[in-house]
Amino acid sequence: LNTKFDKLSDEKKVKYSEVIYDSSKNIYSLLENLLQWARTQTDKIEFAPTSFKLKDLVDQNFTLLKEHLTNKKISLKHDIKDTCDVYADRNMINTVLRNLLTNAIKFTKAGGNITVSTAEKDGFIEVSIKDTGIGMSEEETSKLFRVDDNFSKNGTAGETGTGLGLILCKEFVVKNGGEIWVESSAGKGSKFSFTLRTS
């Protein structure tokens, strides 16, 4: 585009523009995760837990990811009530939700479904994000959340990743006093769950 703009057809200009757009979004997401993770490693990130409604944060992320959902014709829904209040750092949990939802979209085929649900257990809210995607083998799931054995694979539409998002998710959930885990099997989708304190 930079050197041959006048010689390219409109079709190729559109194609190259889409590639640049997608690459820019991926680079921005990677950079944001890298910076946040680096700040956690040097204790430079502010930890400011407050009480907030989980539904508002989930709805905010649903709106943010609407374009991705439309492009892949994926249905996204939740059953979180207005009364579901949690006590955590809102910015950190926003990053956790965004990463987990983005991953669910990434590994779900066109026409699939993603569901976010909650359950109250022993003073904690268990948040689960379940998809009908391609799933993972036991060997693959054992490599998640680990800096020493970083794992990543391409999505159903060729989306790329680094595996850093899940490492950041674990850092943030643990920082907020919770736990995070995954249940998955190849070809049968995945279910990522994490816990947060109730307010």
Image: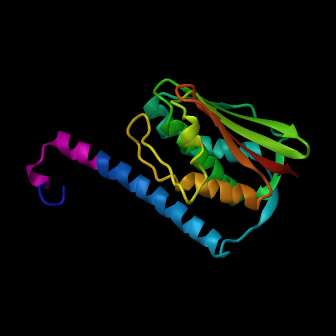
Report whether 28 appears left or right of 181.
Answer: left
Q: Which residues are magenta?
A: 5-17
What residue is shown at x 74% (from left), y 42% (from top)? Answer: 55
What residue is shown at x 75% (from left), y 50% (from top)? Answer: 179
Residue 18 in magenta?
A: no
Q: Is residue 86 above or below residue 188?
A: below
- In this view, the residue in front, 114 or 164, is 164
Q: Quadrant of residue 3?
A: bottom left
Query: Looking at the picture, how far across and down is residue 5, in whole percent?
Result: 14, 54
Q: Is residue 77 above or below residue 62?
A: above
Query: Looking at the picture, how far across and down is residue 59, in whole percent?
Result: 66, 42
Q: Quadrant of residue 100?
A: top right
Query: Looking at the picture, how far across and down is residue 134, in whole percent?
Result: 51, 30
Helix, strand or loop: magenta stretch: helix
- In this view, the residue in front, 1 or 112, is 112
What residue is shown at x 69% (from left), y 48% (from top)? Answer: 57
